[in-house]
Structure formats: structure tokens, C-alpha cells
Amino acid sequence: MLPAASSKSLSSLMAALLCAFVAMLSCGTARAAEPLEVRIGVITHKAPPPALYELDPTPEDEAAAGAGLAIDDNNTTGRFSGQRYVLDQVVLDKDQSPVESAVKLADAGAKFLVVALTADELLAVADALKGRPVVVFNAAAQDDRLRGADCRANVFHVPPSRAMLTDALVQYLSTKRWMKLFLTYGPTAADKLYADALKQSAKKFGLTLVAEKAWEFGPLARARSDSITQSDALVFSRGVDYDIMLVADEEADFGDYLSYRTWDPKVIAGTQGLIATSWHRAQDAWGSAQLQSRFFKRAKRTMRPIDYQAWVAVRAVGEAVTRTKSADPAAISTFLVDPKFQLAAFKGVPVNFRGWDHQLRQPVLIAQPMAIVSVSPQQGYLHQRSVLDTLGADQPESQCHLP
């Protein structure tokens, strides 16, 4: 029979061993716990085959490369916060249905879709997924109607709308006192939409449209050769007193031809020349250089606006999941329009989404081909809520009022 003291020591030892065993089991359970999986789908179009010689062809991985980098960034944080992000990519052939692809991705478990589609395709996808637990991020379409009469509650818009882009550009022109505008626009529907946005911005900020002409000389910027028609284009702007020529040419058919060929030595701005854009290869302020470097290392090319917009969309999901500790699409959708949601997007200030139309508030870069010229909103433009709301349709004038 053991002495009382020895018996007491043995009991204490057994108790300690039991506690250690329980702790070991607890640790094993913690290690075995699977991270929360967040599946994000990306839908893009197959890049068109380039011409025999194309100066700036569309990359085959446009948008997908930005989304992929954001998945890496999300997983860096997710390793510590208990999430694992998976990217499911669909590249659409010419006759492939974006709606069918979106539904298949949703059925396979993707609760968040980043789409680089046209406005009509985006609306078709959003309507097909209405009522399902899926949030759609627009990564490409700039159409104002998507943030207006055709807005959808299950869609969030990352690209600046045309109105935001033209407001950003015209704000800069106003600060330079370039008040008299000569507008020329191409034949496509997109050209006319951009031209209309320019005219609205000019009116909004008090600039004067002194002349407006349709471009009728064909795609001279693509021809890159001398011809008789060039002599007509040389005098296209003769006899007009203006400060700057604005160009609406979203297909890049003629806008690059105009620089240095106008009758008077004037700056070209709009879709070519001095542009307003969400992202630019020359952007290196506010830590942008490290994002540019990481993207270049991963994709072996520079980051384009649609790449950046896809990156922001995927990062927005990651930030919202981390903050809410949930991957529920309804919870994420609610949090994205909460003032507490803020995303560091390498633009000097945090960005967030407007509640009434789900448009991303963001500074817009004013750039020439090889350098950043300025960033809008320009100094001096004020707003009762956010100076970023001086760009694009503000809440009182918006035709979209989401709950």
C-alpha cells in the first residue's frame, strides 16, 4: 500500500497526463478542420486572332490573369484566417453561351462570378441567376445604363462607367482652363455613347462644345500608311476656334491618327491621346509598383485595365469574406455596400461600392501613353458625401435605386 503522499502525487500525475491527452486531441481536431472554401468563377471571351501585325493585341489571359493574382493574394491572407480560394475559369468560344457557362459554374459551387462580358451578356447572366445565391461582378462593361435603368441587385460594377471616365477627364480640362471643345466621334454605337457622355460632362462642368463632327475618313489609325484621304483629314479641324479636340473612338480606328495631324497644334483627348482610365501601365504611386511587378512576374506582361478590374473584384470578395468570416453571398452582398467595407486598391484612398447602384467609387487616372498626368477627382471639387461621387451619376440623378 502506497503512502498517502505518494498516492496523492500519482493522482496528480494521472490528472496531468489526462489533461495533456485532451489537449492533444483538441489540437488534432483543430489541425483536421478544413478551411472555408470560396469558389470564384471567371468568364471571359476568347481573344480575337490578331491582325498580321498588331501593336497591342488583346492578351489571351486578359481579366483571368488579374483574377488569378487576386486569388494568390486572397490565399496569402486565407492561410491565416481559415479560407481557401479556388478560381474556376471559362473562356468562351465565339458561339458559346455565357448564360449556360454561368449557370454551370454556379451549379458547381461558384458563389461569386467575375465576368468580362458585353452589357447585354452581363444582363442575361444576371437575370439567369436572379434568386440564386450568386453575386456577379462586372469587370469590363462601362455602359451607364447598367448603373441606371438596367441595374441589377445581384451585380456589382468595378469598371468606371463612361460618365465617370468623361467626368474625370473634363474635370482635368477645366482645371487647365481648356474650355472650348471640338468633338469628333466614330460610327459605332459605343462611339456615340462615349460622345454623349463627353457632352454631358462638358455641360456638367461648364465647358463649351464649339464644334461636333462625325469621322468619315475610315480607320486611318489602323492603315498606318499614306493615302489621298489623309489630305482631307489634315484639314478636318480647319476653321474652328477650340482649345482641345475630344475623340470618341472605342475601337481605336482613327483616334491615334489625329495626334500631330490637326490643322492647329492642339491636344487630343478622350479614347486616345490624353485618356481617363481605371488603370495604366505607368501607374506606380501608392504602392502600385509592387502590384505591377507581381503581375508582370506572373503574367509576363503589363497589367491592363480589365486585368486590374478583375483583380479588384476578386480582392473585394476576399476582403469581405475575411471581415465577415462568412462566404454566404447574401452576407457578402450586404457588407459590400456597408460603409465599413473598404478595399486598398493602390489609388491613394480606399475604394468602396455605392449603395444605390453598386458602382465602385474610385479615383480615375488621367494618362498619356507613357505617363500618369493627373488623378481625378481634381482638387476643388467637393461633395457632401464623398468627392469620388463627383464622378458619374450621383444618387439624386441616378435611375437606379437599389434597396
Image: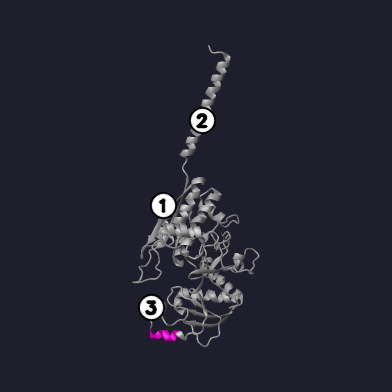
Q: Which residue is mark 2?
A: 22
Whichever of callouts 1 and 3 sits on the residue coming sooner in the sequence is 1
Q: Residue at x 42, y 76 (%)?
A: 253
Label 1 and label 2: CA atoms lie apart by 39 Å
Disc marking residue 152? none
The answer to whether 328 is drawn above or below residue 398 in the figure is above
Residue 4 seen by the camera = yes
Q: Residue at x 58, y 68 (%)?
A: 391
Q: Position of residue 329 (x, y in %)?
A: 51, 53
Q: Which residue is mark 1?
A: 108
Q: Residue furthest bottom?
A: 239
Would you identify the image quadrant in which residue 181 lies? bottom right
Q: Position of residue 198 (x, y in %)?
A: 54, 75
Q: Residue at x 57, y 56 (%)?
A: 342
The answer to whether 273 is drawn above or below residue 15 in the figure is below
Query: Nearer the viewer's eye, disc 1 or disc 3?
Result: 3
Look at the numbered disc 3 and give the secondary structure of its residue: helix
- Locate residue 354 relative to residue 72 in the image: left or right: right
Whichever of callouts 1 and 2 sits on the residue coming sooner in the sequence is 2
Whichever of callouts 2 and 3 sits on the residue coming sooner in the sequence is 2
Residue extent of the magenta highlight = 227-233
Q: Nearer the viewer, residue 9 or 126?
A: 9
Kindly check if marks 1 and 2 are in contact, taking CB atoms under 8 A apart as contact.
no
Q: Which residue is mark 3?
A: 223
